[in-house]
Each structure stands twice: as structure tokens, then as C-alpha cells.
Image (spheres, rainbow, N blue to C red):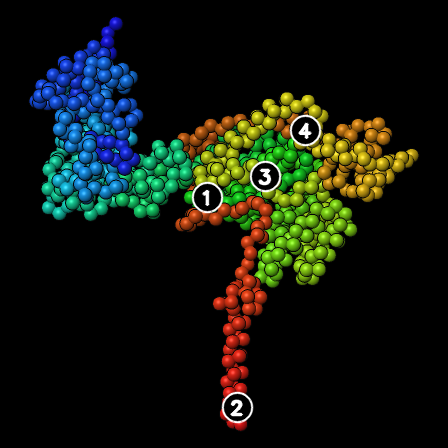
Amino acid sequence: MATKKIIAICQSGGEFVANKDGSLSYNGGEAYALDLDEQTLLNDFKQELAETFHSGVDGMLIKYFLPGNKKTLITISKDKDLKRMVNFFQNADQVEVFVISEEGAARNISNMPASRSSRTTVSEAVVPVATPVNMSHPDDPIDTMMPTDASPVGTVVEHSDDRHRKAAMQWENTITGVDQRFRSFPEFREALHKYSIAHGFTYKYKKNDSHRVTVKCKSEGCPWRIYASRLATTQLICIKKMSARHTCEGATVKAGYRAGRGWVGKIIKEKLKESPNYKPKDIASDIKREYGIQLNYSQAWRAKEQAREQLQGSYKEAYNQVPLFCEKIKETNPGSIASFATKEDSSFHRLFVSFHASISGFRQGCRPLLFLDSTSLNSKYQGMLLAATAADGDDGVFPVAFAVVDAETDDNWRWFLLELKSAVSTDPPITFVADFENGLRESLHEIFEKCPHGYCLRYLAEKLNRDLKGQFSHEARRLMVQDFYAAAYAPKLEDFDRCTDNIKAISPEAYNWVIRSEPEHWANAFFGGVRYNHMTCNFGQLFYSWVSEANELPITQLVDVLRGKMMELIYSRRVDSTQWVTKLTPSMEGKLQTETANARSLQVLLSHGSTFEVRGDSVNNVDIDHWDCSCKGWQLTGLPCCHAIAVFECLGRSPYEYCSRYFTTESYRLTYAESIHPVPSLEKPVKSELTQIVVTVTPPPTKRPPGRPKMKQAGAIEINKRQLQCSKCKGLGHNKKTCNKAIKNDDASHTDLVISLAAEEET
């Protein structure tokens, strides 16, 4: 069996330099490639090295780095050491070997920090060691070699006698000279850009058109030139003339090299793919370290945007794909609704999507209850996402429909509700939990006229807090909001009155605000719909978390990411439910068992009719024929309360017969019976397969402003931050230094003092 050979990159005459991370790099000198295998003897190898580098064998030291360790040099002193090195690198095909004298080892390694120039900066990194590419003979010198690491490595270690940059050595041969050919001018320009970085100079175009390119060094008086033009009768670009000598010595680069965002975008693209949250400041730091190019924050941010567009596709192109994308959704998911609208200038206006699996699942197994809410998008052209989510039988989020719109307006909400009405059935009537602003109150009443509208308690509490701010202390506002929530959840009128009386005791104005806020739309004691004790519209937090993960994507990709998440959710919940053996879903089964345990201490007074009296801490009346209890727990939740269960046990009936059908395992499985299918990716807009007409959709006119986007937080109201309170006038929102009343009082005191003194003079 033949012994495998590896190539030893043998280097001598340079020096080791310590990097910032403690690793070592070898700079300068000469390098040659020699063959090695397990049978090679150390003395033979040394003799060949001596002949190659024209040196003696005596005092020769041979060292190498272990794989993945650039901090420790291993010495080869016997045949076994050499064989061990070959075994270490038998899967690598090549190994770096450093040939130094004992004197040189003492100078370059032991005194390494002292060998670095005082001009070397800490942030500057080191050039990678070269390895052969397309070697035709093992003795070819290092000038035919390329770096071992495919990833670009930092800027130069700048010594007083070596000022030119050595970063990006892998690009030093992207331009080789006359007769070199390229497939296009963009390819030539990119090669030229890399070549200039590797050789440390900047350039400018004298001519730059579709037929020819003439470039010169930007430094005044430098003779470097290059001329390329299209090769006759072909599409190839050929370098016709090149003056490769520079006299500027990279002075232009010392003054500052500005890289185009397109070039930086290409460099960081792969890293951005692995780390989507790659920060602009880290991009600037990496480019400075690896290429010696200084970027400010804005340049790094724009480069990231361009790299993101290269990875995700063009935002502009995505809007143009919307018509075809809607057709593909309906084609791959029959029964789905996917519609869009543009403005008169063909700019994007809104897009509505509801998959057939969502429509069917809501109709078959979900409660007639929908939560409407919105969240902002952080893509290049901003926009808002409107959504309608439902609650499945296990109180899990079930997305029904969503829309991407250019802005959250009354008109867009009205359009969304009209599209939603075509997807859902209003028999039985649907209870909506939503904000009362943004035109929702009027639009819901008009489009879903027989459907109750429960105001979102979170938005109401935020409005109450805003209206009271500046009038009351933090503690007073906290207690009023707390009583407001208690009033909303209160099941009976007397409980509601007690909570609002607590508010009235703090402030009659706040009490009047609560009474005027239409309690019939938010208080359990008055609300006519069935919302199963869900009081806020941010129930669909799971869905909005998906949006936040993908809200910077182009519009078609955003929709497809949401589709994929919904597809996985439906599949996983369908599979999970096959393991359930209870009649009710797990969460509802747990609630029923809790009520059953509470029922054991209750006393039931039997009756010949359907109404029973149940005694415990309080006395409640239960009507089993009408599924009603005076505690209101049965009506509010859809599950029998402990008082009703106590009656069932006395009558020998099963409480499962009196649970809402929406909580059964059977209904849950119906909710997730249908699947969402993949939608094929769109490479570019084509003619509509149905209309054979190209529909053009352009981006909306509004672009994302500079600065960090402000996210709409769908959470509980925050009233924990205390307001400033003046120690002089006891007012809120200012301190004693900025107190106007204190200033006026001081002025008044001063005036009184002047009058008093004047009166004393007259007497």
C-alpha cells in the first residue's frame, strides 16, 4: 500500500510576532514546499532543508504548530517527533514547518515582545501563512502560494522598516496583468477592488463605461495604470495595458481608505447568515482588524443592509412579487384567501392572508372568539401587521388571519375586517376583544353588527393612566388602576360597584372617567358577549413573537416565515393530541378537577325543579337546565363551577356533560385537522398564470427613519416608574429647582419685603 505524502511548507528567514489574542504568526523570509511521509528520516529532511535554504545542518531547529493551536511551537528533535507531526497532519495534506537557527530562536521567540516595533498598534492583526495552490512542482517558491485560511484576516503589523499593509493577501493576485480575462465588467471591478486592498492603494476611474475602463492610482504622480476593454466578438473583458509599478508607497492608504458598502456587504454576508444580529459596531471593528479599513457606524450599517438584501432578496423586488405570491398561496392551499391592494401610483397598500387550515380550524373547533391587535414592522419600508387570533380548546393561540398594511389607519382596519368577514362565519355570533380606537369601534359595529365588542382592558388601563398622569401621585394611580382591573373582572353588579366606589374615594373625577368609558363593553357584570374571561387582545403573544423574529424581512419572506411557523404549530399540536386520553383538553381537565375538589365541602339543598341552593362560604343558586350559577363562574368560563359540580354529584350526573364543547379533545383535534402546505419560492416576477398580465407593485413611499425603531409593546401596563414630586409645592412632574410656584412665592416675598422697607422709611 502506498504511503500518503503531505506537503511541508518550510519557512525560514522571517520572525514570529505575537498577536493580541496570544497566538503567533510568522512574517517575512522565504518559503519552499517539500514532500514528507511517515518513512522520512529527520537527518534526511534536515539535509534537504539545508540544501534548499543554503544553510548548515548544525544548529538547525525545526518547529511546527499543533493543529488548531497557534500559541505553542513544537520542536522536532528525533525521527519519532517527525513521524508524529506527519500523523497529526495526515488529513490536512500540508503542514507549516519553521526552520530557524538556535540563535534566531533565542532572538525571535524568547524576546518576541521586544522585537515588535513601537509603531505597531494593538488592534492590528497578522497576515496568514501561505500555502501552495496548483503546485506543479514541490520546489516552487512561495510567490505562487495563497493563504491557508479562506477567511480574511486582519490588517498589518506595521514596523518602522515595513509600512505597507499586508492584509487580505489572498487577493494579491486577483489582477495578474495584461491578457487576463473576466466574464464581465462587474467581475473586473470587484477583482480590482480586492487587488487594491491587498496592495495598499486607492484608485480612481478615468473612463468607466460599458465598453472600456481606464483606472489610475489616486496618488498624484504615481505611474500605476490599468486599461481593460471588451474583447472583440466576445462578451469577455480583457486587460490590454497595465503599468504595475507604484511610486506612492501606499501613502493614499495611510491617509484613509474608504471601502464601498457593496464590497463590505459581500465580505460580511456569510457571517451575517450565521449571526443575524451582527451589530454595525462589530462589523466596523472586524473590518478594521481584518482589512485595515476604517468604517464609521453609518457605513457599517449600510453595508449590513446591503448584505441583508443580498441574503434575503430585494425589498423592492419582494413587493413586485406580491401578486404572484397570492396566486401561489391559493394554488397550493385551496380555500385560502390571499388578496392585496395598491394605491393609484401602484405602490403597495395592503396584503391579507388567511390559510384554509386556519379558516377550517376556527369554524370546526374554536370558540367564537377573536382577538384583534397589531404590531409594527421594522423592514426597510416599515408598515404594520394586523392580526386576528383565536383560542383553541387548550387555551393555545390559533392564528386565523393577518394582514400587512402600509400604516395602522381606520381605513386599513375596516378593509381587514371586511376581508376577515369573508373567511369566518358569524353563526354563532363572534365575540371580539379589541381596542376601541383606530376606527375599530365603528368598523366592528358596521361590519359585524350582531357581534359583541369587548374593549381590551390593557388599552383602557393605559388610557386611564395617561389621563390621570400629572393629577395624582404614583401610589394613587396604581391603586386606581388596580381597582379598575378588579371592577372589570367582577362577575356581579355589587362587586363592580364596590370596586368603583374605591376609585371614587380616591378621586370623583377618576370615577366619572370609569363610568363614562362604557362598562358594558369591558366589565363582566355588564358585558353581553361570551369571551371566556379573556379580557385583553394581546392573547396571541406567540404569534407576535414570530412576527418580531421576522419583521425585518422583505414582505413575501415575512409572510412565508409566518406560514412555516403556523404549519409547524398545526402539525405538532395534531401529533400531541393523539396521545391525549381525557375527554377534555389537558388545561381544561385540570381546571375541572380543581373545581371538583372545591365542591366536596359544599352543601346542596335538593329541589324538585332544576334550581338548587348551594351553601359554603356564600349561598349560590344553580340552574342546571340553563347552565347558570349566581356566582357567574359557569357562564364566564364555559366550565361548571364548584357549586354546579356539587349539584351534579348529588344527582349522580357527570360534569363533562355540562362543559362547553369547545373544550373537548374531539374539538381540539378538529381545530388542527387540516394542514398548511408549502408555497414554492419565487425567483422573480413573471406573468400571472391566470391573467397573463404583469401586475407591478412598488414599495410604499414611507421608509424607515434613522435610529432604533420604537417597538409597540403588547404587555401589561407599566405604572411602576415614579414621577418627580416637588418638595416645595408637592406638585408632580418637576422638582424644587424648576418649581414655578416656588419662584412666584419667592418673587412675592421679595415684593412684600420691599414694600415693608419703604413703609419703615416713610415713618
- Furthest residue toward bottom: 763
Residue on which disc 3 sits: 540
- Which sits in the foreground, 535 or 55? 55
Closer to the chain start, of discs 2 and 3, is: 3
Cβ atoms under marks 2 and 4 closer than 8 Å: no
Residue at screen point 20% across, 19% down: 76
> Label 3: few (<14), some or many (≥20) within 10 Å?
many
Cβ atoms under marks 2 and 3 closer than 8 Å: no
Closer to the chain start, of discs 1 and 4, is: 1
The amino acid at mark 3 is Gly
Mark closer to the observer (2, 3)? 2
Residue at screen point 63% across, 44% down: 536
Q: CA distance from mark 2 to mark 4?
A: 90 Å
Residue on which disc 2 sits: 760
Residue 229 seen by the camera: no
- Which sits in the foreground, 373 or 38? 38
> Label 1: few (<14), some or many (≥20) within 10 Å?
many
Residue at screen point 55% across, 31% down: 566
Residue on which disc 4 sits: 585
Residue 72 seen by the camera: yes
In the rendered structure, the answer to whether residue 254 lies left or right of residue 289 reads left
- Furthest residue toward top: 1
Q: CA distance from mark 1 to mark 4?
A: 37 Å
Residue 675: percent from the left, percent from the top?
57, 26
In which quadrant will I find the N terminus?
top left
The amino acid at mark 2 is Glu
Q: CA distance from mark 3 to mark 4?
A: 19 Å
Residue on which disc 1 sits: 378
